[in-house]
Amino acid sequence: MSDGDVIELGKEFDYDGFQVVRREFFAHTNEPSITFNNFKVYVNAACLSRFQAVDYVQVLVNSDSKILAIRPCMEEERDAFSWCVPGSGRRKPRQITCRLFFAKVFSLMDWNTDYRYKLLGKVIHANDEYLIAFDLSATEVYQRVYKDGQKPKTSRTPVFPEGWQNQFGLPFKEHRNSMQINIFDGYAVYGIKENAASAAETTEENSQLEMDHDALQGGSVG
């Protein structure tokens, strides 16, 4: 770029009054995303490509800041679940039925269970870990259209939050601080799989631990 193509303003240029246009307003097939639809939750291929060696994750939710985070983890960790379909070829996202978790998120955000919700994520690095963070308040909504005598169809045109209607995005300074979050402060780790057996197993394990503890106490007294 030649000097003749550049207008030099120095420190006269000020970002006050500027808004950073939301990426949701552009095509974003290569951006990490998560979708809630028909009591199922699933990520897209872009999430898997960001973590190519990760097969198991946990979901963390901060009810106060309305941030959902996906944390890579080991299979044996509590509340870990497989987010992909493994295979000899390219991995594919797994659609996970999770009615309880689905209901809790929709209740938290006051969403409509008849609609499909898609959120764009951002890979963040904090506390020596990499996660994908999603702002639950920044969602694309795909409404279902009902016509007499026909099956409902999901609109291909997203509806954005009402607060976005008269703006392009966040003010520049607010945007810079928008993802400054403490990953584990105030988060709850959710078990995605609806598995009643896991609760029973936990009860059995606790009972066995109590029995072992009592046995040890009895042995030490004798």
Image (cartoon, rainbow, N blue to C red):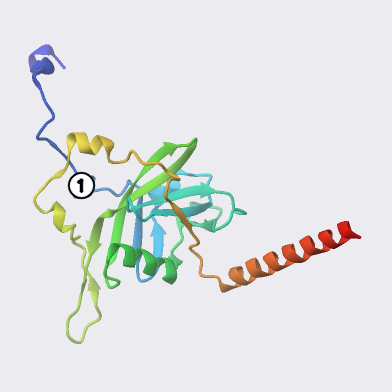
Residue 192 percent coordinates (x, y): 48, 63
Instruction: Write down the quadrant of residue 17 in the picture.
Output: top left
Residue 82 percent coordinates (x, y): 52, 57
Picture layout, residue 112 above or below residue 83:
below
Quarter of the picture containing the C terminus is bottom right
Picture layout, residue 145 above or below residue 129:
below
Residue drawn 11% across the image and 47% down it: 167
**Residue at the far bottom in the pictured view:** 149
Quarter of the picture containing the N terminus is top left
Viewer-proximal residue among 52 and 215: 215
**At numbered mark 1, what does the secondary structure look like: helix, strand or loop?**
loop
Mark 1 sits on what residue?
26
Image-based side of 117 in relation to 44, left or right: left
Picture layout, residue 126 above or below residue 106:
above
Image-based side of 122 in relation to 128, left or right: left
| Callout 1 crowding tier (Cα within 10 Å): few <14, some 14–19, many ≥20 | few
**Residue at the far front in the pictured view:** 221
Residue 221 percent coordinates (x, y): 88, 59
Residue drawn 32% across the image and 53% down it: 66
Instruction: Write down the quadrant of residue 165 in the picture.
Output: bottom left
Picture layout, residue 154 above or below residue 33:
below
Residue drawn 79% across the image and 64% down it: 214
Q: Which amino acid does label 1 sit on?
A: Phe
**Residue at the far right in the pictured view:** 222
Q: How many marks?
A: 1
Image-based side of 206 in relation to 158, left or right: right
Viewer-proximal residue among 212 and 99: 212
